[in-house]
Amino acid sequence: MTSADPAPGTPLPRPTAGAPADLADLVIRDADVVDGSGAPSYRADVAVRDGRIVAIVKEAAAAGCQRPSGRRTLDAEGLALSPGFIDMHAHSDLELLRNPDHSAKAAQGVTLEVLGQDGLSYAPVDDRTLAEVRRAITGWNGYGDDVDIDWRSVGEYLDRLDEGIAVNAAYLVPQGTVRMLALGWEDRAATPAELDRMRQLVAEGLEQGAVGMSSGLTYTPGMYAPDAELTELCRVVASHGGYYCPHHRSYGAGALAAYEEMIALTRAAGCPLHLAHATMNFGVNEGRAPELLALLDDALASGADISLDTYPYTPGCTTLVALLPSWASEGGPEEILRRLADPETAERVRHDLEVTGADGCHGVPVDWDTVEISGVGDPALADHVGRTVRETARLRGEAPWETARRLLVADRLGPTILQHVGHEENVRAIMRHRAHTGGSDGILRGSKPHPRAYGTFPRYLGHYARELGVLSLEECVAHLTGRPAARLRLPDRGLVREGYRADLVLFDPATVAAGATFEAPRTPPAGIPHVLVDGRFVIEDGRRTGVLAGRSVRRTPVG
């Protein structure tokens, strides 16, 4: 930057009386623009004013044409300029409010996250369901007693985000939370009145700005919903111009059937479908990504509206309690704890987990060697973190199930886990698909979280694009920007275009890389010196500025 530039983090100046009307707040000079469309990159000056891109002058220096003028300039020689990255699957619902600095995502170049994932989040709620959902997903977001949860509706939650956050955020109405409100934690079909109540709650959430609806169909109570119920809710989503984002019923033994189920369900409802963390995991699915891709291609060719997201890692991440069979979770968190405390019932749980293959573990018998504890709520249990359940059981001289059971009870269902069940060839094949977008599925809590929370986007650019060539740079950026913006129906984000919002990332294609590893999961990325949200630097010269330029991004009304 020029020597006259203000200190890092200083808001860009606004026009003053008598200043030229076309003088930009910021001019980014000689950037290699990777515009988010997948088209070849080009060299240009890009001018920003009042939070929007107001001019793009290609090859300005070489052409000898007049270059845009600004109160501030940034020399981008050697850097790529792209739209800000869109995290299509984020779990920062409370973290954005607890820690508005949010460097975990801002440092990666993320300028928009989609929250409310996997059918469980904090709006809409009442006093009863708020307490229940806080306990149910304490492993994702902490219990939340350090956040003033003063909202109850989707609109009120979005209003709270509008008070100032580091990056922008969109929200999905969580179907499991909606079911919790309408009929509790019961494993049964809804009555007509209860179904009407769920329709009303979904419609209200969409009218208040949600971009669609999510489900967690291996999580209770959302998994208790039959297809007919989900179809009816998806009809409401479609009528409001939203999309359905399911964590479907199996990523293991029944994965392909579960994908087929979601495609058929949304086609019957006339609803766009976005498949969450679209993986093919566990030993039963090794090498089977081409079967999934053929299924998607057939559906797309026949007119289905489908997109998907993945994270660029093989291990998954969830909560330890999520592995339990669904019958053990009926009634909610306190009932789970009661069943775990009863030796006879706990033995039934163990049999389902280790012998039958619980629906919570995707129909595959659990392999305790693959289940690594990544976080606990109680610091007294920290010695479990970083070890597999089997490792800890061996050290304690007990059976793995007894270790898992004891930990669930002691930590009040709080432990998070890494599950080492993925396959690299499946990861690469799926990320090449034309419907693919990027999502971190990042849980930020715990002392040893999955590195995808801190490394997803630079890992795509560095490891998979530059080092392996799985995607070209232009393709990779399109997967992370233009494609997700199109799914979200955002008319002015996701591309470097005049008139678009100045949510922008400057990165070095030669050095961009994820710093986060499984051993050091919170290490910042390399090669991303500048990130702008609404035309303001949230990352400048590789450092967080403290600017809170993010706000809620609400559904574009139909028509």
Image (cartoon, rainbow, N blue to C red):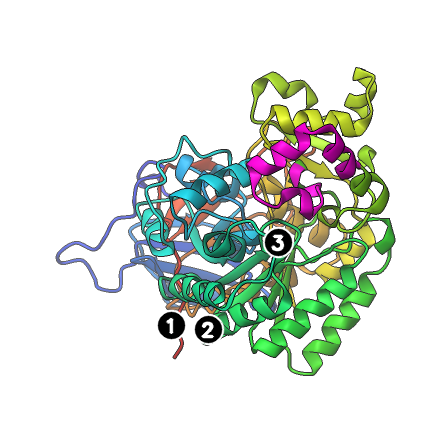
Magenta-highlighted residues: 321-350
Mark 1–mark 2 Cα distance, whole angstroms, equals 7 Å
Circle 2 SS class = loop
Please state which of residues 382 and 293 is positioned toward the viewer in this rendering. Answer: 382
Residue located 50% across and 65% down the image: 485
Residue located 57% across and 22% down the image: 378
Residue bearing the label numbered 1 = 557
Q: Horizontal and vertical percent for residue 359?
A: 74, 50
Residue 551 shown left or right of residue 380 in the figure: left
- Label 1: few (<14), some (14–19) or many (≥20) C-alpha neighbours in 10 Å: few
What amino acid type is highlighted by mark number 3? Answer: Asp
Q: Residue 16: which numbered mark, if any?
A: none
Disc 3 to disc 2: CB gap under 8 Å: no
Circle 1 SS class = loop
Sooner in the amino-acid sequence: mark 1 or mark 3: 3
Residue located 52% across and 55% down the image: 86
Q: Residue 241: which numbered mark, if any?
A: 2
Say whether residue 322 is magenta.
Answer: yes
Disc 1 to disc 2: CB gap under 8 Å: yes
Circle 3 SS class = loop
Residue bearing the label numbered 3 = 187
- Label 2: few (<14), some (14–19) or many (≥20) C-alpha neighbours in 10 Å: some
Mark 3–mark 2 Cα distance, whole angstroms, equals 30 Å
Q: Residue furthest bottom?
A: 302
What amino acid type is highlighted by mark number 2? Answer: Gly
Sooner in the amino-acid sequence: mark 3 or mark 2: 3
Q: Main secondary structure of the magenta part?
A: helix
